[in-house]
Every structure is written in C-alpha cells, then in structure tokens.
C-alpha cells in the first residue's frame, strides 16, 4: 500500500472535537493499509496568542527566543492528537521537528530546510505506528529550535513527503480544495478538480492563501503530487499533479 503524508492546519485542530475528527481521518487512512505521517499546525489562534504573550514580556524579544516560544504550539497539537489516536486503539507517536530530523539553517523565524534525517520516522513506520510531526519547526546546527515562517507547516509536510518518498501529500484545510475564488466570500466560486504547478504558483504569488508559495515550489521541484481537501467534509478536493501522472492512479482519493 501507499505512504501518505497528511497535513492539518490550525482550523482543523482548533479544539478537542476537531482533534478527534482529525484522528478519525488519520486512522481511516491507516485502516486502508497505508502508512501515515501527519504534520500538524498549532491550534487555532495559538501562534498569535503566543506572540501577544511575548509582547507583554518583551516587545523586542530576539528571534531565537521567539522561535523557542512559537515552536511549543505545534507540540501541543501533535501530543493531543496522538492521545486521541491511542484512545481509538491505534499506536501513535508524536515527534517534534527536531525529533523528526528536520535540519535547517539558522535564520530564526524564517529558516530554510537543509535536509531531513528520516531514520526515526522510518523506524516508527516500520513498527506500524502512526507518526505525528510538529510542522513549522526544525533544528539548526547549534541545536536551537527554528521556525520556518509563514506557511511553514505546508512546507514541512511537502519536504517530509519528498524525503520519505511518499506517494502523495494531502493538505487538509477548511475548504473543499482550490476554487476560482474564495467560496466563503464568493458563493458562485467553482472548485478546480485538478490543476498544474504553474497555475497554483501564479495563484499563490497573487495572494491566494490555500497553499504557501514555498510549499508549491518544493512540490514542483520534486514532482510531489498534492491533494488539497477539507477536513470537514467528504467532498472531493483539488489535485495538484506533475505532467505524466494520471490523477486516477493516486492513493486515498475517496
């Protein structure tokens, strides 16, 4: 069966009910026989709340200390989701960015991924565990926590998918894929069933918030198929596929 990386954004894990919903999505994929690595963002407005807490203490805090603080948000999400999965009777393990082998440069608050050591994740997958990874974060050569900046969890997920040789990277959001306009603002907006990298890069560069620009660039460079879908419905999403790949051959489309 396939190796699938699933990424869930902050709205998908915003509270206990939503975390349980994410756990159901992950375990349903696992029950089909697939290996699953799930990358999670911080819950809801957690990152903004942490920034406000920092401002109360020191409005001019160093970027290094801000990264130490902000990296905690994703750790809450992965540990709670692992607990939810364990309660459902499945084996799961949560890993921080550094435990997952995400090695970055030292550009605090906007770090770039240099390479990923996948040994720990692969060991857990070989033991048939569901692996939950904190998005948005890594570790530099000094051993310091770093964060990847805006859209960092999307980038984490795609980079992990590439490093692990995954069959597809699924990006779960609060809308049913990519639309011709924001369906929350334009009711007549139409879902795009399939789109190429160039088109989605153009949309991202024009301000579309469905996928981060860096994430799409990474996927295009390594021909990683993406499936943008909603964590709140069963409706089809949008496939972002490289030339020469038949979308119908990709796993977990139902």
Image (cartoon, helix red, strand yellow):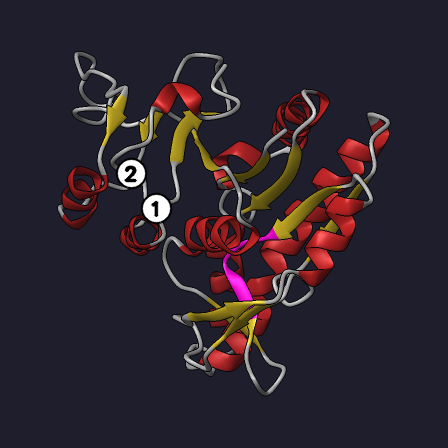
Across and down, in percent, residue 206 comes to: 13, 46
Residue 74, x across and y down, in percent: 60, 53
Q: Which residue is mark 2?
A: 242
Residue farthest toward the bottom in the current orientation of the protein: 142
Q: Which of the 4 quarters of the picture holds residue 6?
A: top right
Please tell me whether residue 136 belongs to the stretch shown in magenta: yes
| SS category of the residue bearing label 2 | loop
Q: Which residues are magenta?
A: 134-138
Residue at left offset 50%, top offset 14%? 254
Q: Is residue 58 among the parts visible in the rendering?
A: yes
Decide if residue 67 is on the left or right side of residue 31.
left
Q: Residue at x 70, y 62 (%)?
A: 119
Q: Residue furthest front?
A: 244
Q: Does the CB distance between marks 2 and 1 fall below 8 Å?
A: yes
Task: Give the mark count.
Answer: 2
Identify the residue position indicated by label 1 in the image. 223
Looking at the rendering, which quadrant does residue 1 occupy?
top right
């Amino acid at each position: 069966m396939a190796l699938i990386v699933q990424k869930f954004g902050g709205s998908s894990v915003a509270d206990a009910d939503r975390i349980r919903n994410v756990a159901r999505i992950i375990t349903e994929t696992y029950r089909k026989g697939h290996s699953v690595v799930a990358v999670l963002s911080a819950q809801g407005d957690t990152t903004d709340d942490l920034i406000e807490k920092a401002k109360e203490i020191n409005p001019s805090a160093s970027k290094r200390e801000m990264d130490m603080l902000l990296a905690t948000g994703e750790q809450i999400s992965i540990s709670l989701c692992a607990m939810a999965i364990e309660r459902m009777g499945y084996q799961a393990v949560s890993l921080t960015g550094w435990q997952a082998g995400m090695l970055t440069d030292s550009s605090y608050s906007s770090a770039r991924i240099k390479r990923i050591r996948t040994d720990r994740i692969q060991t857990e997958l070989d033991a048939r565990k569901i692996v939950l990874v904190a998005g948005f974060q890594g570790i530099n050569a000094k051993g310091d926590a770093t964060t990847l900046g805006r859209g960092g969890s999307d980038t984490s997920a795609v980079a992990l998918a590439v490093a692990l040789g995954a069959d597809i990277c699924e990006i779960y959001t609060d809308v049913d894929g990519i639309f011709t306009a924001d369906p929350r603002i334009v009711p007549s907006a139409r879902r795009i069933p399939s789109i190429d990298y160039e088109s989605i890069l153009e949309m991202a560069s024009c301000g579309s918030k469905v996928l981060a620009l860096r994430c799409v660039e990474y996927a295009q460079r390594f021909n990683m198929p993406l499936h943008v879908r909603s964590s709140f419905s069963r409706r089809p999403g949008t496939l972002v596929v490289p030339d020469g790949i038949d979308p119908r051959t990709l796993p977990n489309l139902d």
